[in-house]
Image (tube, rainbow, N blue to C red):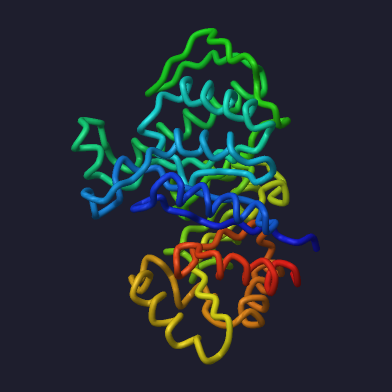
Amino acid sequence: MSKPEIGVYLPQMGFTYDEVLHRTRRCEQLGIDSVWLYDHLYGPGVPDYPSLEAWTLATALLSNTERIEIGHMVLCNQFRHPAVLAKMATTLDQISAGRLQLGIGSGSIEDEHHRVGLDWGTFRERSERLGETLEILHQAFADEVIDFTGKHFTVQDMPVKPGPARRPRPPIVVGGVGEKYTLPLVARYADVWNVPTYALGELESKTSVLRRLCEQAGRDPSTIVLSVEAVMALAPDDASLPSVRQLAEKRFGAPAFGLKEGGLVGTAPAILDRLQQLRELGFGQIVLFTHDRASDETLELLAAEVIAKL
């Protein structure tokens, strides 16, 4: 079984651009595969914190690196018209020579929609919009033209040239575990399915549901890369583990972060064992929050004592 892709999640809340760029370049130098940003108009729950805009930031990072891939965990489908998003994605994929990963979801923060006058709608409506966007993206990437009439979006003979640099397309990452709306979209459209932190206790059951939905849709489930995001609290030695655990619980102790269910708290051998378990469960992409917001020390320890031994 091949080594899973290891990414680092860098929510940009409170970071300056130089701080994000430094961490991204350090990840690249250390051989970490990808870096992931969030897509919110302000830091969720802390609107007075500085927070850089997601797509502009990804463009700058990709323009100032050479190998590492950049994605969003995940873009809010409500923020950008899908035809404009398709054009943005193909352009950035060309600029970066095929290093964009296109994570997208239906939207998660109602408050930011109300503040700027964007329609929130029901979860069903947001899922319908996401489904139409995914169809539009597939058309744009495959055909370099969009011709689509849906309930929420209509696009007529819209060229998208140049197409993406990566073929057949930048990986489309869809996150979520909802069995009624989200997983059917994953089965139909996603190249990568990301399990969010809040569902880490349901990995096997949700994977089983996705396999069943793929079979119903006539799709081979092995064509979807299984991805997981999880908090990692990596301690350099046993003596420092209590303080590392304490910081992780302070920052990521809320149930939605799945700190306990993720099982990624410990020294390098324990982290390595857990990543091996996730690989054996079929996960080909693992995106890690770090307990200390990606310090140089933790990134170096992750690369040397964990990733190098996978």
Image quadrant for the N terminus?
Answer: bottom right
Residue reaching furthest bottom?
Answer: 239
Question: Residue at left 70%, top 67%?
Answer: 307
Question: Residue at left 58%, top 67%?
Answer: 204
Q: Is residue 63 left or right of residue 168?
A: left
Which quadrant would residue 246 be assigned to in this image?
bottom left
Instruction: Report the front residue among 189 and 267.
Output: 267
Question: Residue at left 42%, top 53%?
Answer: 11
Instruction: Report the front residue among 22 and 165.
Output: 22
Q: Is residue 31 left or right of residue 236?
A: right
Q: Position of residue 212 (x, y in %)?
A: 61, 54
Which quadrant would residue 118 be assigned to in this image?
top left
* 182 in relation to 189, above or below: below
Image quadrant for the C terminus?
Answer: bottom right
Instruction: Report the front residue among 26 and 245.
Output: 26
Residue reaching furthest top?
Answer: 157
Q: Position of residue 160 (x, y in %)?
A: 58, 15
Instruction: Report the front residue among 185 and 47.
Output: 47
Q: Position of residue 180 (x, y in %)?
A: 44, 49
Q: Position of residue 78 (x, y in %)?
A: 36, 33
Which quadrant would residue 93 be assigned to in this image?
top right
